[in-house]
């Protein structure tokens, strides 16, 4: 057992428990923890928000919790350890997270949906708006989460592998809270950076044209 730094190292971590996959994505002082089954595919839960470490205790204020209607949880207190290079949540079940290999992508980071494109000076959503759609990209993994920070209402999430190369953004869906049958689908889009904005164009899952603008959080 050893102490841990003031923040968990930025990256993506995986653990297995009770036949389910736990995916922990961390950037700076923000984390997202998602739980799902791969075979057969089934979404279980996701939660995330801002955290700090107090010694070996992780304390988190959640921005979203997909199980909020059932458990009412808005804060977490989790004992954490580092043993032999692995990150451990000393919970029930005990989660032993292994850090994924580095796979940096040009779009890595946290993004908030701002507006539908094209940009014609229309009103944009941002951190001040309680209704948020967050897209969290790190190490070739993506997840979008739609939620309301005032009411803790959860609208949906999906995630899996992604790549962003030469203007082409690709998502391979591994979990989707609204429809497990979407797991295994691959979606291709175009992307372009304009200042701090990510312009995202192509066709949605229904084959309809789409144009979204995301702003760096």
Image (cartoon, rainbow, N blue to C red):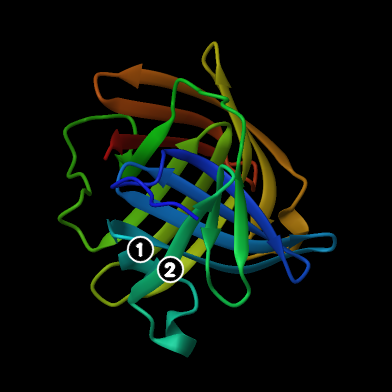
Q: Position of residue 16 (x, y in %)?
A: 71, 59
The residue that mark 2 highlights is 79
Q: Residues within 10 Å of mark 1 (few under 14, many from 20)?
A: some
The residue that mark 1 highlights is 58
Q: Position of residue 197 (x, y in %)?
A: 29, 27
* Left or right of 162, for residue 47: left
Instruction: Tell me which corner region of the image, top left, top right, bottom left or bottom right, holds residue 32.
Output: bottom left
Q: Where 88 falls versus 174 (above or below)?
A: below
Is disc 1 in contact with disc 2, using a CB cutoff of under 8 Å? yes
In depth, the one of 85 and 71 nearer the eye is: 85
Q: Estimate the spatial distance between the alpha carbons at disc 1 and disc 2, rounded to whole Å.
A: 6 Å
Residue at image x 23%, y 73%? 150
In depth, the one of 101 and 167 nearer the eye is: 101
Instruction: Tell me which corner region of the image, top left, top right, bottom left or bottom right, holds residue 26.
Output: top left
Q: Identify the secondary structure beneath mark 2.
A: strand
In depth, the one of 121 and 13 nearer the eye is: 13
Q: Position of residue 190 (x, y in %)?
A: 52, 23
Residue found farthest to the right: 39
């Amino acid at each position: 057992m050893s102490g841990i730094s003031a923040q968990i190292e930025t990256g993506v971590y995986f653990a297995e428990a009770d036949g389910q996959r736990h995916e922990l994505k961390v950037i700076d002082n923000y984390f997202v923890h998602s739980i799902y089954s791969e075979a057969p595919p089934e979404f279980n839960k996701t939660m995330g928000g801002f955290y700090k470490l107090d010694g070996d205790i992780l304390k988190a204020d959640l921005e979203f919790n997909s199980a909020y209607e059932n458990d009412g949880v808005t804060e977490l207190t989790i004992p954490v350890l580092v043993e032999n290079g692995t990150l451990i949540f000393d919970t029930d079940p005990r989660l032993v997270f292994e850090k994924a290999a580095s796979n940096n992508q040009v779009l890595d980071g946290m993004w908030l949906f701002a507006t539908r494109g094209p940009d014609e000076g229309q009103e944009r959503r941002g951190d001040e708006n309680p209704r948020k759609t967050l897209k969290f990209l790190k190490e070739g993994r993506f997840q979008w989460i739609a939620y309301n920070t005032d009411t803790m209402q959860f609208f949906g999430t999906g995630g899996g592998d992604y790549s962003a190369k030469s203007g082409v953004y690709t998502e391979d869906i591994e979990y989707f809270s609204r429809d497990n049958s979407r797991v295994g689908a691959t979606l291709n889009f175009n992307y372009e950076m304009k200042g701090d904005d990510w312009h995202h164009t192509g066709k949605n899952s229904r084959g309809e044209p789409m144009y979204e603008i995301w702003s760096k959080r």
